[in-house]
């Protein structure tokens, strides 16, 4: 099992597994070629994610009849804690003690329609993912509150199911 990923500053995405091949990252859909970033006139999926995150710390984006969640993190490293449903920009999951001390702020909501997702690099081409660009993620189906906390220079994003 992989532990952490290096996204080299690219946004983190939580993408329903069935939609992953539709995410083309930095590939220009008009040419099929790799494109340089253009956040003012987004052409690629990567551009769309970055432009949306310039307005918010998280964003839902449409893709192939579904939605994915884009997350702004502060560093290159990304780790997934499956028990706590937390994405963080570090190489280690949040300790139970730190989790208890964290002050969480709601930054959004996201409705999942499937349990199987991938945590992946927004710059990556979902049709040709490399092993170092994703981690498997299992999420509860339904509406989730997206919460953020900062501790010791690390950003944590928690997905909390809404009961009922």
Image (spheres, grey):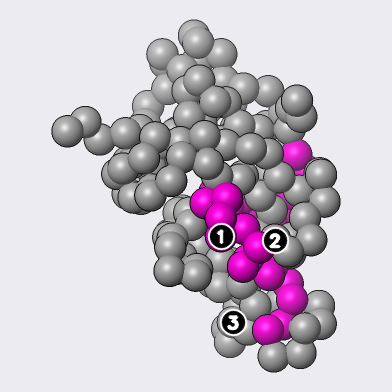
Packing grade of label 3 (10 A; few <14, some 14-19, many >=20) is some
Please state, as top left, top right, bottom left or bottom right, where the C terminus lies in the image.
top left
Packing grade of label 1 (10 A; few <14, some 14-19, many >=20) is some
Q: From the viewer's perspective, is residue 151 above or below residue 14?
A: above
Q: Earlier in the sequence, mark 1 or mark 3?
A: 1
Q: Earlier in the sequence, mark 2 or mark 1?
A: 1
Q: Is residue 25 magenta?
A: yes
- Check whether the beta carbons of the residues at disc 2 and disc 1 lie within 8 A of each other: yes
- Kind of element beneath mark 2: helix
Would you name the residue on which mark 1 appears? 19
What is the magenta range?
Answer: 5-29
Distance of label 2 from label 1 (alpha carbons): 8 Å
Would you name the residue on which mark 2 appears? 126
Q: Earlier in the sequence, mark 3 or mark 2?
A: 3
- Kind of element beneath mark 1: helix
In percent of width and height, residue 108 lies at: 34, 50
In-front residue for pair 123/114: 114
In percent of width and height, residue 71 lies at: 53, 51
Residue 54 visible at all: no
- Kind of element beneath mark 3: loop
Would you name the residue on which mark 3 appears? 42
């Amino acid at each position: 099992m992989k532990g952490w990923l290096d996204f080299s500053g690219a946004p983190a995405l939580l993408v329903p597994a069935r939609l992953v091949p539709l995410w083309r990252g930095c590939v220009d859909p008009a040419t099929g070629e790799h494109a340089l970033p253009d956040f003012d006139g987004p052409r690629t999926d990567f551009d769309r994610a970055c432009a949306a995150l310039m307005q918010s710390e998280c964003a839902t984006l449409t893709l192939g009849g579904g939605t994915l969640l884009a997350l702004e993190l502060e560093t290159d490293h990304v780790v997934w804690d499956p028990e706590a449903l937390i994405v963080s920009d570090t190489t280690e999951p949040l300790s139970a003690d730190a989790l208890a001390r964290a002050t969480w702020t709601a930054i959004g909501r996201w409705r999942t329609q499937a349990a199987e997702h991938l945590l992946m690099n927004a710059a990556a081409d979902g049709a040709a993912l490399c092993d170092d660009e994703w981690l498997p993620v299992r999420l509860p189906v339904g509406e989730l509150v997206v919460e953020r906390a900062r501790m010791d220079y690390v950003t944590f994003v928690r997905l909390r199911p809404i009961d009922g």
